Image (tube, grey):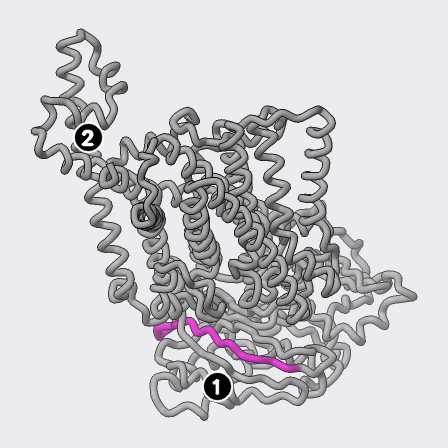
Amino acid sequence: MLIIFMDRRVVHQKQHQQLLLSKFSAQTGRTHVMLQSENAPLDQTGMKEFAELADQYYWFKPLKLLKNGTVGKIWNATSYSCGISIFELQKAVVIIVLMHNVDNVRGQSSSPQINTNSISKLPAQTGKTPVILQTKIAPMNQTGMKEFAELFDQYYWSKRLKLLKDGNCRKNMESYITQLRNGSFWASKMYDASGRYNGQFFFGNDYWLGSWTLCHELQNPNTNNEIPPFPVYFFVVKFKVNMGITFTPQPRQIHLGLCLPKSCDIMDVRKLLLEERTNAINTTIIDVRTVPGSYSIFKDYTFQIVGTSGLMTLMLIIVASVVEVLLKKKVCHSHSKNDGETNRTVESSISKEKIISSPNSLKKEHRILLRLLLAFSAISNGRKIISANSSVSKDVIGCFHGLRVFSIGWIILVHTYLQIFGIGANKSLRTITEQNFMYQTIANATFSVDTFFFISGLLVTLVFLRNEVSKDENPQENSLVAVLSSSISKFALMIAYRFIRLTPAYLFVLGVNEVVVRHIHNNSVFTPAIVDHITCEKYWWRNALYINNFYPRAEFCMLWSWYMANDTQFFVVASILLLTGIRGNKQLKCVAASISILLLSSWLATFILAIKHDFVAKVQEPFALFDELYDKPWMRIGPYLIGMIIGYVLFKLNGKLVFTPAVVILGWILSLMCLGSLVYGLGKHGLAVPASAFYAALGHTAWGLSLAWITVACCSGYGGPFNVLFSFKLFLPLSKLTYGAYLVHPTIMFLTSFALDGSLQIHNVLMVVIFFGNAVLSFICAFVISLAFEAPAINLMKIVMG
């Protein structure tokens, strides 16, 4: 335990005691005071010595005090009473002594709060001088690690200031460095707010950020007794460092935060940094920028579009909600007069449709306008979203609600890990985490998207077939022209319905995401790898047409939107197959053959591409071959086609299949074994190339087959506890929000993680806590998105289509 007192206050006014931490030099016999007054010599300045406090680099000579790895007895001199802390260095133990009652040391020191239970009292002894830390063992320019620890240290910038042109920047920098070396408090705080080497570099710490918040806070007179005599600003420097193949097999990029005078610009800072020359370290300045940057959100064209759209939608929602309340009260009053019921009872039972159809509510010719307006009502839409009544639709399959919620939770969990991995200070723990067998549970979350594909394929087929049966069309219209005309119109209607239902929310989130990422790049101390503020501005139309998965990953807007593109493309294929299959048994056989060909083609194409590109399936590279395989429809269509087949089976058998107990047990065993092998089959080091090719080709379809059994078993009464869990009523409203949660959750993660002042320590407990926060925020935002865009779009389509 090392106790440090930096505060300049007198200890115990009555006793006039002073406590300080001293450093003893064996070469000169002098005791250098660690924390000095502002009049201390330059070579004894407090801030620099404090920065080197307990630095193991200086511990070489004091090790001779230790005997055979045991603690040598070091007693205090005269009337000293000492507290000790023990640091174990392999087999050696070093003692750091905290002295108090030092009457012969002048100056001020701090008023500590000492826990006497944790400090051992040594008896008074004479003739001994406590030895604490030793002097340097080599010049700084002869040891790479020490040079690295002092890399870009402002304390040594005095000689570099001559590189700056005469002006405010040079003047303010000279004042800052001089006052820093003289121990000025405001300069020490500027130095303290800047970043520097802080350990764990070889364990993945690439962030020496300091604190831009505290840097800007230095100018606040309400929280600082001393403020800098000039405005300050925060600079973030990204540089590449190479310490040789032993220390850095690959050059590393480091983010360095500097709190400097605002009068200095980016070129001034770059000049100061370019003068860093060492014998053992090569550095290259990549970028220098200010935080915050010059970006103004109100001048952003995308923000203006998104903001205007949001405000207009909000106005419609408010007006529609107010109109619904007023009309409901009017109808309620009319019913209460006629029926003698209380207003509250009648009001709660009146639906939106009843208000519209009421003869006293509105003139007949204006009812269509009222219906269009009430499509935006937050009252009726919100009630539908949060309703846990599953009887509102005959097409609902209860277990799908739980499957949707668990799948989106799985996606948010893996993205949470990737989020923290990106801003973690101890990135080597990522490697340790990824080698854990159970981490495959998180890393293989890609299969959760296959769950959505399976559900989509099944519901599209089931709903379409039930709707076609209920229409009872005229069987006499069998001419080729009539069939083609009917099929084309139905196809166009199906595509239009899907496009209008999904696209408004999609494009709104796309715009919000572009603004958020642009804001992050201009105002965050981190430099995100995502460049949606550039790609979305150029290529947003690809997302709007749902074709973005055919373009390179580097040009992606909203990387996770590949799912929407695939799902829409699968819907187009399914629509063609379904419209063909309903024409007769011959056409149905053609559809069955087409599905078989599509499945075989998917397996073969994926296998060939995986072999060609030497694909290795492993948890450490979740996005391997993204452009060639990961987001492509020929790899992902398997679960969707399986869902279509199961949807047809459930339709033909009316959702009920009968199995013997042996078949039920075997079905569950095979299904769970298949799911388990897909999730936990990669191991620590992944699979060989041939096995990886089979895994990529068949894995997604196998996932769909496993879900097929779970769905059939739950629908037929063989689901047991699984059906009870997945059909839990609380999952019903949440399942309605999974689309919005999928859209918005990465944007929430960008905003929350990159808005931080510094890096985090990777730990599983932290991951779980952040995951729940991400999940809750995602569902809250999804509710707002559904209320504003999804629900109104569905209502409007129902009105237009009758």
Q: Residue 548: x percent and y percent?
A: 43, 63
SS of the residue under disc 1: helix
- Mark closer to the chain start, 2 or 1: 1
Seen from the viewer's position, the closer of residues 163 and 714 is 714
In which quadrant will I find the N terminus? bottom right
Residue bearing the label numbered 1: 272
In space, the residues marked 2 and 1 are separated at their CA atoms by 66 Å
Amino acid type assigned to the residue bearing label 2 in the image: Glu
Of 614 and 112, the residue lying toward us: 614
For label 1, the crowd category at 10 Å Cα-Cα, with few meaning under 14, some 14 to 19 and many 20 or more, is some
The answer to whether residue 658 of the structure is visible from this angle is: yes
User: SS class of the residue under badge 2?
Assistant: helix
Q: Residue flagged by tag 1: what amino acid is it?
A: Leu
Report which residue position mark 2 lands on.
324
- Quadrant containing the C terminus in the rendered view: top left
Residue depicted at x 51% and y 48%: 590
* Residue at the image position 38 percent from the left and 45 percent from the top: 781
Q: Nearer the viewer, residue 426 or 62?
A: 426
Q: In this view, does 220 lie above or below 681?
A: below
Q: Residue at x 24, y 60 (%)?
A: 304
In the rendered view, tell whether residue 673 sits above or below residue 133.
above
Q: Main secondary structure of the magenta part?
A: strand
What residue is drawn where x is 41% and y is 62%?
547
For residue 650, side relative to residue 510 (left or right): right
Query: What range is drawn magenta here?
Result: 225-242
Q: In this view, does 352 lie above or below 55?
A: above
Tell me residue 467's x, y (percent): 38, 34
